[in-house]
Image (spheres, rainbow, N blue to C red):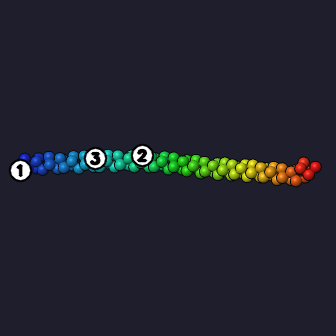
């Protein structure tokens, strides 16, 4: 009987140790998951920040490109207007000067 009681106690201790180790393993696994999720969250935040910066940079570039295009168009139109005015001035000057054929 004493052997059976000792055997029972040994088995009980083994079960307690096993349960304690399992609890410890689960706690470590929980901490690893927690750390993993924290790292993933940091990575996602960094990616969001990069995406935001890229978007802002792209938007600024688009605004700058629109402004350049508008300035280019205005320069072109101003140039065309100056050419047209110069041509008109030449026509008027030609009309005002008497032709040498009539003399």
The residue at the point 86 percent across, 51 percent down is 94
Position of residue 21 in the picture relative to residue 93 (left or right) = left
- Residue at label 1? 1
Helix, strand or loop at label 1? It is loop
Residue 38 visible to the viewer? no
Asked if disc 1 and disc 3 are in contact, CB closer than 8 Å, the reply is no
Of mark 2 and mark 3, the one earlier in the sequence is 3
Q: Crowdedness of circle 1 by 10 Å Cα count: few (<14), some, many (20+)?
A: few
Helix, strand or loop at label 3? It is helix
Query: Residue 69, image x and y in percent?
Result: 66, 50
The residue at the point 88 percent across, 53 percent down is 95
The residue at the point 10 percent across, 48 percent down is 7
User: Residue 25: which disc?
Assistant: 3
Position of residue 39 in the picture relative to residue 73 (left or right) = left
Query: Residue 13, image x and y in percent?
Result: 18, 47
Of mark 1 and mark 2, the one earlier in the sequence is 1
């Amino acid at each position: 009987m004493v052997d059976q009681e000792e055997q029972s106690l040994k088995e009980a201790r083994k079960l307690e140790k096993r349960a304690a180790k399992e609890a410890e393993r689960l706690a470590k696994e929980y901490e690893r998951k927690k750390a993993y999720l924290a790292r993933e969250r940091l990575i996602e935040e960094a990616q969001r920040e990069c995406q935001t910066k890229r978007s802002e940079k792209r938007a600024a570039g688009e605004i700058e490109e629109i402004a350049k295009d508008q300035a280019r168009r205005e320069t072109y139109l101003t140039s065309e207007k100056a050419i047209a005015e110069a041509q008109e001035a030449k026509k008027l000057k030609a009309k005002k000067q008497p032709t040498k054929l009539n003399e």
